Image: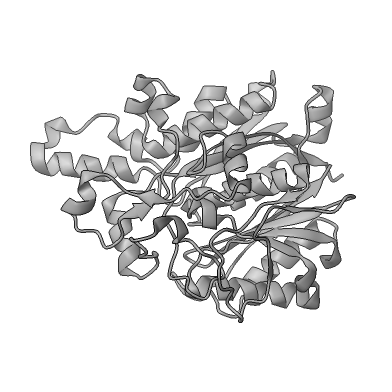
């Protein structure tokens, strides 16, 4: 028998705020989380891109000094978001054997890895910290949450580039449907604002180079878009069966209807321009939700602000919805947050949940001249969603041709 799966807690630390509530408020206010980088290594390494979307609240302001010293920044962000989501869910007295974590990252502990390499070269092997391997492991963020909350039903880590944390939500849904847990903390984190990833992304012409105006650099669908803005942070969602949630009197934000995962098998970085597999992910997610295309009331698009990525997603959306697409409001929230890579799907799923809960589609900032080849109904000011039963999808696509889509319904 198919179970009803619901969202009962949310948490985030993002370029817009140190909590889910602050991030959402800043998003609705049309704020940008992008700013110039003031680190000494920007000039020293002569980076061609000198800005990013950094976490607004430093981890050291939230965690203990001991925790920041023993955790890579990607794990620090995960722990902050996970703890907030758990508290928001009411800190349930869950059976540890029925509590699981499904977390995601695109890169993992890149700061730990590269700092350790610098230490090895400059100071020798005796100076390399014994905690280096646990800190750099991609499963470190999920493990940090799992140990903090004593989750013993399993800790899974997804690494599917920028589709990672949306895939984690799909996995959480499937785990609960299979009866393998009662509660899952799902989400993703990333902390890759480091000279090497910036230089690498810039070398492949993926990053915007608007050094003179960082706040407007991420501009999905604009005719002048020139690349994405690297972001950092984390978002977590507490996902559980409705039966379990109601038994403990939990508040419910929205219903998680499941999702779908597909792959392009086309190119390691470029999306399939026809959007065939991406379209199949959307169709399958909506079908798995027991819904029709006409039921979709809102879309949170992947929309990275890259010239080829935005048009490829549009082609996939048009392939799926046809003329129905003209009547569906679309939000592209990376314009405000930047691109959190492995954490992007989680923060965007969180925004989608809040859009349904508050019946408010968040705005897409920086859209001044919409690309005529992408005729979407883009939300540029907060827009009230209609009353009644609402269904929304959130899209994520990643290097390697990964596609993941998740669907939610209002309560």
Residue 155 seen in render: yes
Q: Nearer the viewer, residue 193 or 278?
A: 193
Residue 180 on image: x %, y %: 70, 36
- The quadrant of the image that shows the C terminus is top right
Residue 291 on image: x %, y %: 85, 59
Number of labels in the image equals 0
In the rendered image, the residue lying farthest to the left is: 123
Residue 276 seen in render: no
Residue 311 on image: x %, y %: 57, 76
Q: Is residue 369 above or below residue 115?
A: below
Q: Nearer the viewer, residue 96 or 245?
A: 245
Horizontal arrangement in the rendering, residue 356 relative to residue 225 (left or right): right
Q: Is residue 90 above or below residue 24?
A: above
Residue 1 on image: x %, y %: 87, 44
Residue shown at 39% from the left, 60% from the top: 213
Q: Is residue 16 above or below residue 151?
A: below
| Colour setup of the view | one colour
Residue shown at 58% from the left, 36% from the top: 22
In the rendered image, the residue lying farthest to the right is: 388
Horizontal arrangement in the rendering, residue 58 relative to residue 20 (left or right): left
Quadrant in the rendering for residue 182: top right
Q: Nearer the viewer, residue 383 or 312?
A: 383
Q: Nearer the viewer, residue 408 or 351?
A: 351
Residue shown at 31% from the left, 43% from the top: 111
Quadrant in the rendering for residue 75: top left
Q: Is residue 187 above or below residue 318?
A: above
């Amino acid at each position: 028998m198919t179970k009803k799966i619901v969202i009962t807690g949310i948490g985030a630390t993002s370029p817009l705020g140190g909590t889910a509530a602050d991030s959402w408020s800043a998003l609705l206010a049309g704020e940008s989380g992008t700013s110039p980088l003031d680190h000494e290594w920007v000039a020293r390494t002569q980076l061609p891109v000198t800005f990013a979307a950094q976490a607004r609240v430093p981890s050291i302001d939230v965690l203990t000094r001991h925790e920041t010293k023993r955790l890579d920044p990607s794990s620090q962000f995960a722990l902050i978001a996970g703890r907030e989501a758990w508290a928001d869910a009411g800190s349930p007295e869950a059976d540890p054997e029925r509590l699981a974590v499904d977390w995601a990252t695109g890169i993992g502990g890149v700061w730990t890895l590269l700092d350790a390499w610098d230490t090895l070269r400059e100071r020798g092997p005796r100076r390399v910290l014994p905690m280096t391997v646990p800190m750099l492991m991609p499963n470190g963020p999920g493990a940090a949450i799992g140990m903090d909350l004593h989750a013993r039903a399993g800790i899974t880590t997804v690494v599917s580039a920028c589709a990672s944390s949306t895939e984690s939500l799909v996995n959480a849904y499937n785990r609960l449907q299979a009866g393998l847990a009662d509660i899952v903390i799902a989400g993703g984190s990333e902390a890759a604002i480091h000279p090497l990833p910036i230089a690498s992304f810039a070398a492949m012409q993926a990053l915007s180079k608007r050094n003179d105006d960082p706040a407007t650099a991420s501009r999905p669908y604009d005719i002048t878009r020139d690349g994405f803005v690297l972001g950092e942070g984390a978002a977590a969602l507490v996902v559980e069966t409705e039966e379990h949630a109601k038994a403990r009197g939990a508040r419910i934000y929205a219903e998680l209807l499941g999702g779908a995962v597909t792959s392009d098998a086309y190119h390691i970085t470029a999306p399939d321009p026809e959007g065939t597999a991406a379209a199949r992910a959307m169709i399958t997610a909506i079908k798995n939700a027991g819904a029709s295309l006409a039921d979709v009331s809102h879309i949170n698009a992947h929309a990275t602000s890259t010239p080829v990525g935005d048009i490829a997603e549009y082609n996939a959306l048009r392939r799926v919805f046809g003329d129905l697409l003209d009547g569906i409001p679309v939000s592209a929230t990376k314009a405000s947050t930047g691109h959190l890579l492995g954490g992007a799907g989680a923060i965007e799923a969180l925004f989608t949940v809040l859009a349904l809960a508050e019946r408010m589609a968040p705005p897409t900032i920086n859209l001044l001249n919409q690309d005529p080849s992408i005729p979407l109904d883009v939300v540029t000011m907060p827009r009230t969603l209609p009353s009644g039963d609402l269904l929304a999808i959130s899209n994520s696509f990643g290097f390697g041709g990964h596609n993941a889509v998740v669907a939610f319904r209002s309560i």
